[in-house]
């Protein structure tokens, strides 16, 4: 049977919708369930697996979680047991509509079971019954000339995502049913958008994650390099061990060696006690070296030795320590060119760049802008009521060059939420790019 139409009622700006987390590797199942829950005035977040669902719950605890009958990365029974132990107040429902005695029965359990039943029946009748929603739909943005031409016309103040005029942005549903190998072409939950360049990033992450291969992530500042590193770690066999991150550009050269390798008491002035370094702390897990291009040449040679033999020597100590870590490095610089010019050790570069992932600038996947805006506004709405955005504001965002990429978009939207005050909708006047460098 087809999903029954559920009217979407407007929310009062001071009302906060109930939040539900849907965990499933089946995108069509998530689409159908999100469609029904949204009609029942739930704010829905999605996760493609157990680890992603756990991370979502830790960032903002939902009122309810619906888990599919199978998870691609974790055993379902173990996930349910551990999740219930860490989040005892969350109403946890499996795709079979069941929950254990230890799981609290939330006040909206009947709505969850109704949405689950509707989505399952619709999936049995027609896999493509539910329309695509924000994150899994393909959006065609006007090209830059069309955006400039339309800027001079009358302003459409219909909120994007309000069920009214969608502002001229064509929305087309993606295929619901995919072959087992198609999972490599699906985006990671960490990466928002379905542009080909972003799907290629997700594909590369899925391919390299199960291996021990060192990964080098290249991309402009603010393009999500750390999110890619987190995705590699999450999908790897090392996901239950820590991922230790260090920004090589943020720590003074004199302290960077001790921060990486650790030091003994009295190794240098101010070292009143010994300390374990980031590399040793990541034993069994992943070490993320952000802005590796800023690492001093002298320290690069010591890092090279560790990469080659897996042994490190704490500052002020003669003995070596064996450590098992996977290295992921990131840079916004053309590291290959720097290696050729001698500004970066070429032997270290070739050790780190065994597998290369490039994160594209936002200007290269502007068709993902509506999805990114929706995602960021939803995240900003965890502390205040979620705001929507009108067409004129979205077109103003689409006409910007975004030198700061997604990070700049986050700052612009956060500024807009503040400027909008109690208003539930962001307008063009709330979009302030601040001081920009031409």
Image: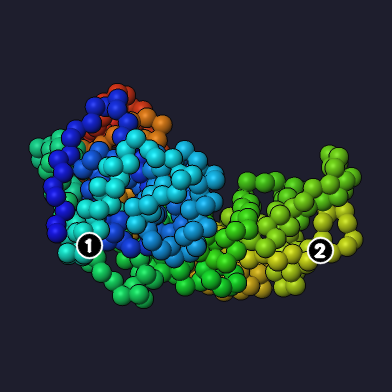
Nearer to us of marks 1 and 2 is: 1
Q: Nearer the viewer, residue 326 or 124?
A: 124
- In the displayed structure, would residue 167 be above or below residue 217? above
Side of 254 where 414 appears, left or right: left
Disc nearer the start of the sequence (1/2): 1
At a point 33% along the width and 63% down the height, the residue shown is 26
At a point 14% along the width and 50% down the height, the residue shown is 4
Side of 162 where 361 appears, left or right: right
Q: Nearer the viewer, residue 49 or 342?
A: 49
Q: Look at the numbered disc 1 and give the secondary structure of its residue.
A: helix
CB contact under 8 Å: marks 1 and 2: no
Q: Which residue is mark 2?
A: 321
Binning the other alpha carbons within 10 Å of mark 2 as few (below 14), some (14 to 19) or many (20 upward) gives: few
- The number of numbered badges drawn on the structure is 2
Expressed as whole percent of the image width and height from the top left, the position of residue 373 reads 31, 45
At a point 74% along the width and 53% down the height, the residue shown is 277
Q: Which residue is mark 1?
A: 123
Q: Look at the numbered disc 2 and give the secondary structure of its residue.
A: strand
Expressed as whole percent of the image width and height from the top left, the position of residue 86 reads 54, 44
């Amino acid at each position: 049977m087809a999903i029954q139409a559920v009217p979407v009622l407007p929310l009062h700006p001071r009302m906060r919708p109930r939040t539900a987390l849907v965990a499933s590797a089946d995108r069509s199942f998530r689409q159908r369930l999100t469609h029904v829950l949204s009609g029942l005035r739930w704010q829905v977040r999605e996760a493609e697996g157990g680890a992603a669902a756990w991370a979502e719950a830790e960032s903002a605890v939902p009122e309810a979680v619906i888990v599919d009958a199978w998870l691609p990365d974790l055993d379902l029974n173990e996930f349910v047991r551990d999740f219930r132990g860490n989040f005892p107040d969350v109403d946890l429902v499996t795709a079979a509509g069941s929950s254990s005695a230890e799981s609290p029965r939330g006040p909206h359990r009947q709505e969850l079971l109704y949405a689950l039943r509707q989505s399952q029946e619709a999936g049995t009748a027609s896999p493509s019954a539910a329309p695509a929603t924000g994150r899994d739909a393909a959006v065609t943005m006007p090209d830059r000339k069309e955006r400039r031409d339309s800027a001079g016309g009358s302003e459409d103040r219909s909120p994007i995502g309000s069920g009214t005029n969608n502002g001229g942005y064509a929305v087309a549903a993606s295929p619901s049913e995919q072959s087992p190998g198609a999972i490599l072409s699906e985006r990671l939950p960490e990466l928002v958008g379905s542009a080909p360049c972003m799907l290629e990033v997700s594909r590369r992450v899925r391919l390299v994650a199960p291996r021990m291969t060192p990964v080098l992530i290249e991309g402009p500042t603010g393009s999500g390099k750390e999110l890619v590193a987190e995705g590699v770690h999450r999908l790897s066999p090392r996901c239950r061990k820590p991922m230790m991150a260090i920004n090589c550009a943020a720590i003074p050269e004199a302290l960077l060696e001790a921060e990486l390798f650790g030091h003994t008491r009295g190794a240098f002035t101010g070292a009143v006690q010994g300390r374990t370094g980031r590399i040793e702390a990541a034993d069994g897990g992943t070490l993320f070296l952000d802005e590796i291009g800023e690492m001093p040449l002298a320290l690069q040679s010591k890092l090279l030795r560790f990469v080659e033999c897996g042994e490190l020597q704490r500052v002020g100590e003669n003995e070596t320590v064996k450590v098992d870590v996977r290295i992921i490095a990131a840079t916004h610089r053309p590291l290959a060119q720097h290696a050729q010019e001698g500004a970066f050790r070429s032997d270290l570069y070739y050790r780190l760049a065994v597998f290369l992932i490039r994160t594209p600038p936002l200007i290269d996947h502007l068709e993902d802008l509506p999805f990114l805006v929706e995602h960021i506004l939803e995240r900003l709405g965890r502390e205040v009521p979620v705001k929507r955005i009108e067409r004129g504001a979205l077109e103003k965002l689409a006409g910007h060059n975004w030198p700061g990429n997604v990070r700049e978009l986050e700052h612009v939207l956060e500024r807009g939420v503040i400027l909008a005050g109690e208003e539930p909708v962001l307008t063009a006047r709330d979009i302030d790019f601040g001081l920009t460098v031409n």
